[in-house]
Amino acid sequence: MTENHQGANTRFVHAGQEFEPVTGAVVPPLHFSSTYAQDGIGGLRNGYEYGRGTNPTRDALQAQLAGAEFGTHAFSFSSGLAAEDSLIRAILRPGDHIVLGNDAYGGTFRLIDRVLGDWGIGNTPVNMADEAALAAAIEKNKAKLVWVETPSNPMMTITDIAKVAEIAHAAGALLVVDNTFASPFLQQPLTLGADIVVHSTTKYIGGHSDVVGGAVIVKDAQLAEKIGFIQFAVGAVSGPMDAFLTTRGLKTLGVRMRAHSENAAQVAGWLRERSEVERVLYPGFEDHPGHEIAKKQMSGFGGMVSVQFTGGESAARKIAESTKLFTLAESLGGIESLMNYPSEMTHASVKGTELAVPVNLLRLSVGIEDPADLIEDLDKAFANL
């Protein structure tokens, strides 16, 4: 059986994780060295020269990430936004344009609009479900990149990756898919037509809220060469310990995602029955606008649930500050359950724009605790309304 035909959990555990040949250690050693001895000037041992360019621990993680996403090349960075920044600067030049979803993650939009915008990169937010509007935006702006999050953060919008890939490629654009919410266990965008996958590995891949990182995965050698050059030249790489922790997290991704998904389904179902709730955004519901697409391109519905309250902003804030097991905090995808008020936290940077998040919305990252305990925690918080 070749690596590309192995099951997800097998790839997560074994890709890039060969045992250490000298001692036979099953877990590859952690390499902290910043530089490497040369056998004469330019005589590199297995290509290792300096830690910014190469590190065996980071190389092992990158092989693991490529295997997880059915890519040929992967690049590990110090954060998700560092990964996105390096990707964009590897491909685009001043005057180029990005078309992105109109409910993109606030940090991504801030990077594209306020940082790279000053560098001359234009952007147009669009409803990715509106195929005509998407095609028109790409054509009008001669966009070179189309940027998709699916499920999106925090509105849980589902985008048809294969369809958007078809539209983007017809116009000569590349498709980037942020696969952070789904993770490589539930969705593999490169197999659906995407050109590039990005991750905040801080989230489900790391999985334990103890490491910050990002990744870019591709299957095109020319793209890989451009991204690899920026990774080396700019140097926003993951350090050895960060790479090691991310590798350890990725090995258990499959078993964790099953628990996240099962728990989220129960929490979403409970929330939907509450009179205090206006709407639950969860693609596992059959009446979710993207449910059928999610069924087609995902093997599960994930651990993220967003909820809007009939009591408006005050109700959302009250719940956010009343739970015990759900910790009020930034981030997501860890084994512990987290709750976030996006309007003032993760998406504060898009307030006042068309990407603004409703003020009555909370985003729940459902952990792997016992679901009955999570529901009891929410029930007690609802009693404060």
Image (cartoon, rainbow, N blue to C red):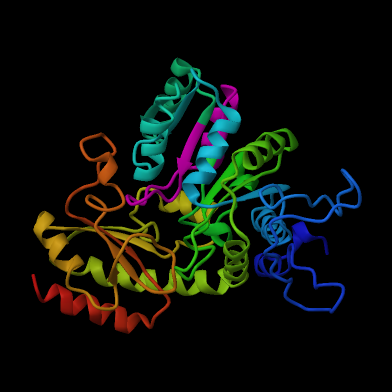
Q: Quadrant of residue 287?
A: bottom left
Q: Position of residue 135 (x, y in %)?
A: 46, 24
Is residue 141 positioned above or below 203 on the image? above
Count of labels shown?
0
Q: Is residue 140 visible?
A: yes
Q: Position of residue 337 (x, y in %)?
A: 35, 72
The reply, left or right, for residue 237 in relation to residue 153 is right
Specify the quadrant that holds the N terminus.
Answer: bottom right
At horizontal 12% and vertical 55% (from top left) the residue drawn is 313
Q: Residue at x 43, y 28 (%)?
A: 134
Query: Is residue 147 part of the magenta span, yes or no?
Result: yes
174 falls in the magenta region: yes
Q: Quadrant of the C terminus?
A: bottom left
* Furthest residue in direction front, as rendered: 40
- For the question of whether residue 105 can be seen, the reply is no
Vertical placement of 248 versus 349: above or below? below
Vertical arrangement, residue 215 with respect to residue 86, above or below: below
* Left or right: 367 as drawn, with respect to 85: left
Quarter residue 9 falls in: bottom right
Viewer-nearest residue: 168 or 219: 219
Image: magenta residue range: 146-175
Q: In the rendered view, would you say 304 is above or below 113?
A: below
* Residue at (73% x, 71% y) in the render: 29
In the image: residue 37, left or right of residue 178 = right
Q: Nearer the viewer, residue 296 or 281?
A: 281
Q: Position of residue 381 (x, y in %)?
A: 16, 75
